[in-house]
């Protein structure tokens, strides 16, 4: 029995998978999107997972109609970033000095997911199978066949794995990956602050720890999202604190830069690890997002790398629309386009993690920051790299 036939079936409707499906559908390809669970309903509570969306990613999302569905009152442009060591070292990255409008835009994961889903439903170009579980995947000569738990069958030229770090599609395709745990967790929580953040993000490098404060939207401009990358044992200690004690701890670690803090959402933690995938393509298969790579969150670039994957894959497939979408020669063009940006970001974040979070690198990190802060052209180049 044959099923519905598509050029592309994407498994995983997270931010990257949904964006890829939306963009491909807008380009006229026959696309289906398979996801295990519906997006969570959004409410007024601040999402614990926050992303710094680069201007390049924002333009991609605008081009295919997703960004326009966001509530403007819940997004926050970042105009400056103050990075400090544990003594005198400091760098200020300023959008105005670099000749750009903003460095990034802070968006809640759930609200961006909701915006993408609204755009997909409004377009009607993508066949949505959600909630849907995959019962089996069979490889044919030129097509892959997915059988869903309800018996629905989908045939596709190209199967795209956008199903996260523990990708089932990557495993099925035999694409190996190497996980390197950092022995750290990222503790995230949201706070109300006594003083307005004025669109400034803050980051502190200590021995073993990296603390980031990201400005959140809202009419008073006095809310922030925290990401504290720290050894797992210390993360457990932070999670065990009550609301007042945790706020006091985060306030002290950030030198009370924004005054007193009040916890808005309970703290949660996730393990930090580097994920290197030897190849992101195989005949009839391509990986995007966390299925294709994982980086340390200190750069805030993980989701932006994923959107870069989606944009590159869409470009390659539309430029070669007369070809079979699963042709590995076509897919290798996508792989080559993404190899250098991903490797560069992995090398950068991995190296910075070991350099700045080492107890033996205090002098180097503080002196290096002070030196870099006195070189505006180099700082401007750093801003442009972070915005890509």
Image (cartoon, rainbow, N blue to C red):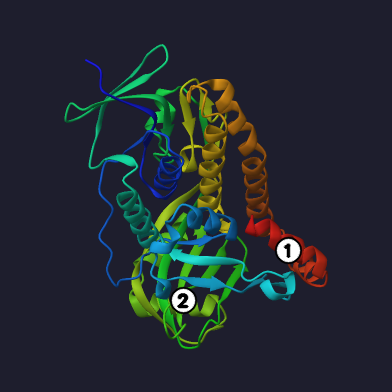
Q: Quadrant of residue 110?
A: bottom left
Expressed as whole percent of the image width and height from the top left, the position of residue 73 reads 41, 75
On screen, residue 31 above or below 323 = below
Q: Residue at x 82, y 66 (%)?
A: 377
- Provide the secondary structure element on which disc 2 rests: helix
Direction from residue 269 to residue 318 in the image, left or right: right
Which quadrant is the N terminus positioned in? top left
Callout count = 2
Q: Quadrant of residue 150?
A: top left
Expressed as whole percent of the image width and height from the top left, the position of residue 297 reads 54, 55
Q: Residue at x 48, y 55 (%)?
A: 61
Q: Residue at x 52, y 21 (%)?
A: 327
Along the line of sight, which residue is nearer the eye, 366 or 175? Answer: 175
First in residue order: circle 2 vs circle 1: 2
- Single out the residue that lies furthest toward the top: 141
- Single out the residue that lies furthest toward the left: 150
**Mark 1 lies on residue:** 365
Q: Residues within 10 Å of mark 2 (few under 14, many from 20)?
A: some
Q: CA distance from mark 2 to mark 1?
A: 23 Å
**Mark 2 lies on residue:** 249
Expressed as whole percent of the image width and height from the top left, the position of residue 227 reads 49, 64
Along the line of sight, which residue is nearer the eye, 102 or 188? Answer: 102
Task: Report if the CB atoms under discs 2 and 1 are less than 8 Å apart.
Answer: no
């Amino acid at each position: 029995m044959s099923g519905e036939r598509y050029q592309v079936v994407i498994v995983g409707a997270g931010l990257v998978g949904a964006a890829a499906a939306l963009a491909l559908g807008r380009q006229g390809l026959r696309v289906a999107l398979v996801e295990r669970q519906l997006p969570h309903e959004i409410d007024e509570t601040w999402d614990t997972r926050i992303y710094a969306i680069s201007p390049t990613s924002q333009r991609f999302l605008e081009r295919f109609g997703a960004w326009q569905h966001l509530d403007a009152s819940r997004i926050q442009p970042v105009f400056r970033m103050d990075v400090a060591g544990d003594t005198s070292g400091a760098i200020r990255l300023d959008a105005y000095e670099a000749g750009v409008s903003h460095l990034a835009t802070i968006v809640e994961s759930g609200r961006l997911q909701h915006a993408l889903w609204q755009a997909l439903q409004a377009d009607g170009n993508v066949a949505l199978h959600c909630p849907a579980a995959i019962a089996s995947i069979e490889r044919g000569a030129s097509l892959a066949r997915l059988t869903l738990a309800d018996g629905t069958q989908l045939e596709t030229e190209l199967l795209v794995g956008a199903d996260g770090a523990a990708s089932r599609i990557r495993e099925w395709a035999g694409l190996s990956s190497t996980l390197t745990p950092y022995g750290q967790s990222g503790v995230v929580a949201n706070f109300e602050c006594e003083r307005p953040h004025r669109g400034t993000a803050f980051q502190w490098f200590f021995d073993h720890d990296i603390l980031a404060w990201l400005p959140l939207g809202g009419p008073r401009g006095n809310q922030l999202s925290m990401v504290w990358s720290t050894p797992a044992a210390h993360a457990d200690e932070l999670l065990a604190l009550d609301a007042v004690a945790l706020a006091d701890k985060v306030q002290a670690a950030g030198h009370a830069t924004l005054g007193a803090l009040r916890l808005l959402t309970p703290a949660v933690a996730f393990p930090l690890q580097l994920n290197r995938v030897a190849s992101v393509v195989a005949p009839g298969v391509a990986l995007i997002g966390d299925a294709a790579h994982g980086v340390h969150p200190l750069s805030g670039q993980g989701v932006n790398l994923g959107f870069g994957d989606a944009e590159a894959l869409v470009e390659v497939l539309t430029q070669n629309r007369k070809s079979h979408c699963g042709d590995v020669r076509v897919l290798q063009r996508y792989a080559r386009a993404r190899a250098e940006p991903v490797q560069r970001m992995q090398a950068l974040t991995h190296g910075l993690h070991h350099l700045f979070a080492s107890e033996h690198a205090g002098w180097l990190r503080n002196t290096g920051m002070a030196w870099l802060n006195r070189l505006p052209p180099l700082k401007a180049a750093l801003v442009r790299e972070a915005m890509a």
